[in-house]
Each structure stands twice: as structure tokens, then as C-alpha cells.
Amino acid sequence: MDKPISGMMIYYYIVCKRKLWYFYNQIQMEGDNENVKIGKVLDENVYKREEKHINIDDVINIDYIKSKCMLHEVKKSKKIEEAGIIQVKYYLYYLKHKGVEGIKGKVDYPLLKQSIDIELTDKDEKYIESSLIDLKEIVNASLPPLLEKRKICKSCAYFELCYI
């Protein structure tokens, strides 16, 4: 594995390991997907006053930072809530290992007018470290993982690739 592990890769690791493999191996299907388009419109139209897309080391891309100690990730729905939470925890983990202490996170759902506060625990760090090992094995495999049929598949940008 020669690419750094991005927040999106961690997100896909939770959502679908097959999607992760495709994404890592540069098989991109998001361009024409309606859900991706909605997400882009949401990104362009919410939190306009905030400085957005804070890229750190070309590894993590934080949606915005409201104050020095609070980073935010914006999601359109809670359908895959766990993945968004783990993505933010990965950002906190990454920053901690870069020497940034005392930072917290938040997952914002502007369409629902809700948010979730996120902190990184020792248990989270252990989970992330074991997930990174598993993630590397997945992306370095010669073939994608076997298809796991899930409810979210119907709205996935990779649906046709997996099912047709």
C-alpha cells in the first residue's frame, strides 16, 4: 500500500469494503450518482461562512473547523451514521499522532438540524489501529471483496458495477 489512508477510505471501510477496494484502486463511479450530487449541493450551500475543506497532508480533508478545538464533518443523513462517526474519530486520531491535542469533533446533519459530538477514546484508538491493518489487507488484495448485499446498496454509486 503506497497511498495514505484518507478519511474517505475509513468511511468506505465501515460502509462497504468492496466500495473501499474500488475507490482505492481508482475505479470511480461517484460522478453521475444522484446522492453524490445532492451531497455536493449541500456542501456548497450550508455553513457558507466557514472556511471549508481543510486539507491536512493530502490525507484528511476536514469539512470545516468552527473553533480551534472543534472540527466538523457534514453528512446529509444518518443512514450510515457509524461511518461518519468513525471518520471523525480517524481525523482526531490522525491529528493526535501529528501532535495536536485537545481537539474534539462533531458530525453535523444540517438537513435534520442535528449534530453529534465526538471524542477519541483509548478504545477508539485501538479500534482504528486494528481497522487500518484490515483496511490495508483489503486494498492490497488483487480482487475486490465478495459482494455483501445490504439495504444501502440501492443508493450506492457502485450499484451497477456490483449487481450488473
Image: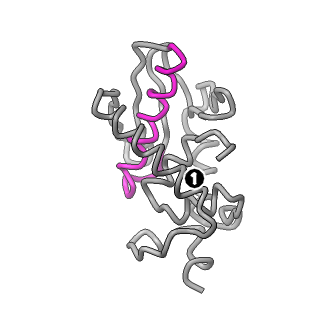
Which image quadrant for residue 70?
top left
The reply to whether the magenta stretch includes residue 80 is yes
Q: Is residue 4 left or right of residue 147?
A: right
Q: Residue 119, relative to residue 29: is it above or below?
A: above
Q: Residue at x 55, y 33 (%)?
A: 47
Q: Position of residue 89 (x, y in %)?
A: 41, 34
Q: Secondary structure at mark 1?
A: helix
Q: Is residue 48 magenta?
A: no
Of 81 and 92, nearer the camera is 92
Q: Residue at x 64, y 47 (%)?
A: 1
Magenta stretch, main secondary structure, is: helix
The answer to whether residue 72 is above or below residue 8 is above
Toward the viewer: 11 or 45? Answer: 11
Q: Where is the C terminus found, in terms of image quarters?
A: bottom right
Mark 1 nearby-residue class (10 Å; few <14, some 14–19, many ≥20): some
46 or 79, nearer to the observer: 79
Indicate the position of residue 37 as horizontal and vertical percent values: 63, 58
The correct choice, above or below, for 37 with respect to 155 in the image is: above
Compared across the picture, whether 143 is left or right of 122 comes to: right
Q: Is residue 109 found left or right of 139 in the rendered image?
A: left
- The figure's colour scheme reads one colour
Which residue type does callout 1 highlight? Gly
Q: Which residues are magenta?
A: 75-99
Whole-percent x, y for residue 102 in the image: 40, 13
Image quarter of residue 35: bottom right
- Name the residue beneath numbered marker 1: 39
140 to the left or right of 151? right
Total numbered labels: 1
